[in-house]
Image (cartoon, helix red, strand yellow):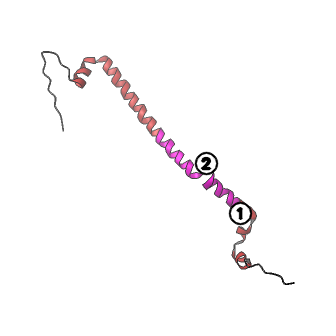
Amino acid sequence: MAVRSNPFKPILKKIPAPLKNKYFIVLAFFCALMIFFDKHDVLTQWRLQQTLNQLEKDKVYYQNKIKEAKEDKRDIELNTEKFARERYYMKKDDEDVFIIIEE
C-alpha cells in the first residue's frame, strides 16, 4: 500500500505561520466583513459624515438668511414708503425718479 503525498505540501510550507492559524483567519475574515461588506461599512459611514457636515453648513446658511429676512420685514414695516420707492420705483405726482445703474 503506497502512501500518497499531498501535492500542496510545498505550497503550505511557504505560507507564514500566522496565516495558518484558524483564529487569525477568522479574525481577518470578520474584519474584512465589517469594513467592506457590512450594512454600516466604513465607506457608508464616511459618506454619511460628509452629508451631515454639508447639512450643518446649510443649516447655518439658512439661519443667516432667516435673520436677514426678519430684518427686512422689520424695515419694511417701519419704512413702507422707503421700501416702495427703492424696490418698485414709486413716486409722488410732483417728483421725478432717476435710476442710476453702476457697473
Q: Position of residue 85 (x, y in %)?
A: 22, 21
Q: Position of residue 56 (x, y in %)?
A: 48, 38
- What residue is shown at x 63% (from left), y 51% (from top)? 38
- What residue is shown at x 35% (from left), y 20% (from top)? 74
- CB within 8 Å, label 2 to label 1: no
Residue labelled with disc 1: 25
Q: Main secondary structure of the magenta part?
A: helix
Separation of marks 2 and 1 at Cα, in angstroms: 22 Å
The range drawn in magenta is: 27-55
Q: Position of residue 91 (x, y in %)?
A: 18, 19
Q: Quadrant of residue 23?
A: bottom right
Q: With 67 as the anchor, is 1 left or right in this view?
A: right
Q: Position of residue 25 (x, y in %)?
A: 71, 63
Q: Quadrant of residue 3?
A: bottom right
The secondary element bearing badge 2 is classed as loop
Quadrant of image for the C terminus: top left
- What residue is shown at x 65% (from left), y 55% (from top)? 33
Q: Residue furthest top?
A: 93
Asked whether 2 or 81 is in front, the reply is 2
Quadrant of image for the N terminus: bottom right
Q: With 32 as the anchor, is 22 left or right in this view?
A: right
Q: Residue furthest front?
A: 1
Q: Amino acid at mark 2?
A: His
First reached walking from the N terminus: tag 2 or tag 1: 1
Q: Amino acid at mark 1?
A: Ile
Q: Residue furthest bottom?
A: 2
Residue labelled with disc 2: 40
Q: With 28 as the anchor, is 59 left or right in this view?
A: left
- What residue is shown at x 54% (from left), y 49% (from top)? 46
